[in-house]
Amino acid sequence: MNRFILLVVGCLLLPTLACADIYIDDFNEGWLAASFFDNGDYSSWKESGLSGVIGGTRDSYFSYTEKYLVDQGQVVLTDSLIMYTDSIGSSIYTKLLYDANGLGLNLDLSKGSDIEVRWKGDHVGFGKPTTMAFTLTDSLTNSYKKSLIWDTYAVLPSDYLSSSFALNEFASGGVQLANVKSILFEYDSDCAFDGRIDYLKVNVPQPPVPEPVSSALFLLGGGVFGLGLLRKKERRNQ
């Protein structure tokens, strides 16, 4: 009887099981703050023990480029956002590495559909592009880089945008998604870009929810099977 009860409970729970999205970085923790005043300025540091970061470690690097004799730029993590302020004619290059402090993530992304970047831009100018890129490396050191370029000729809308990097492209590039060792995110805002990034995450599609009729038939079949096992056991005991 106990087996039958467990079987029915399992049948009830199976359709409700869901796969959760995987957050690479929600920017809720850590300290990011750097100001740049001269061409070629850069800053880098590593933070560990971050629960909202995949692998617990964020390895950050920022470099500043002055292009039109204007020398000011800033990047800061605040209010669950990573924010950028570039003066006219300057740009800030960002590189964020996630590799569990060099130990490797050992991350299975085979069920994921894409990597999503939620971001927005407050102001842009001179028609310069904004580039984002992800590089995935697996445990066998196979690596593939995918870039997206936004044409920032006009002022971007105030609403957040979502940029998507399809994981099947990384697989086609030779990366074994079942064992990803590291994730590298690069962001290059070129010329007068005041922007912010909300999060980086891997979207994992949810399994389809069975229709009521299908669920009923599934449960009925499980129940009949369970009763059959129960009766067979009773006969043996007689």
Image (spheres, rainbow, N blue to C red):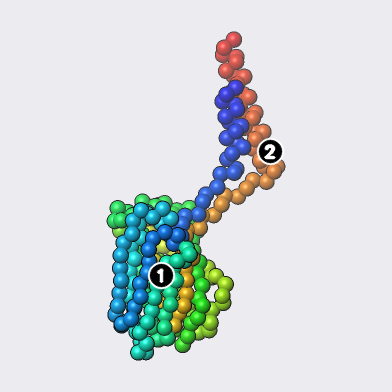
Determine if residue 227 is in view: yes
Quadrant location of the C terminus in the rendered image = top right
Determine if residue 164 is in view: no
For marks 1 and 2, give the CA distance. Answer: 54 Å
Most extreme residue toward the top is 238
Res 11 → quadrant? top right
Q: Position of residue 169 (x, y in %)?
A: 44, 64
Most extreme residue toward the right is 213
Badge 2 element: helix
Disc 1 to disc 2: CB gap under 8 Å: no
Badge 2 density bin: few <14, some 14–19, many ≥20, Cα 10 Å: some
Q: Is residue 236 found left or right of 146 in the rendered image?
A: right
Q: Position of residue 180 (x, y in %)?
A: 37, 55
The residue that label 2 is drawn on is 216
The residue that label 1 is drawn on is 76
Badge 1 element: strand
The residue under label 2 is which amino acid type?
Ala
Badge 1 density bin: few <14, some 14–19, many ≥20, Cα 10 Å: some
Q: Is residue 104 found left or right of 4 in the rendered image?
A: left
Q: Where is residue 80 in the image (x, y as percent from the top left)?
A: 47, 63
Q: Position of residue 16 (x, y in %)?
A: 59, 44
The vertical placement of 26 against 10, above or below, is below
Residue appearing at x 45%, y 53% in the figure: 110
146 and 117: which is toward the camera:
117
Residue appearing at x 56%, y 14% in the figure: 236
- Give the tally of numbered discs: 2
Quadrant location of the N terminus in the rendered image = top right
The vertical placement of 209 against 135, above or below, is above
44 and 236: which is toward the camera:
44
The residue under label 1 is which amino acid type?
Val
Dot in front, 1 or 2? 1
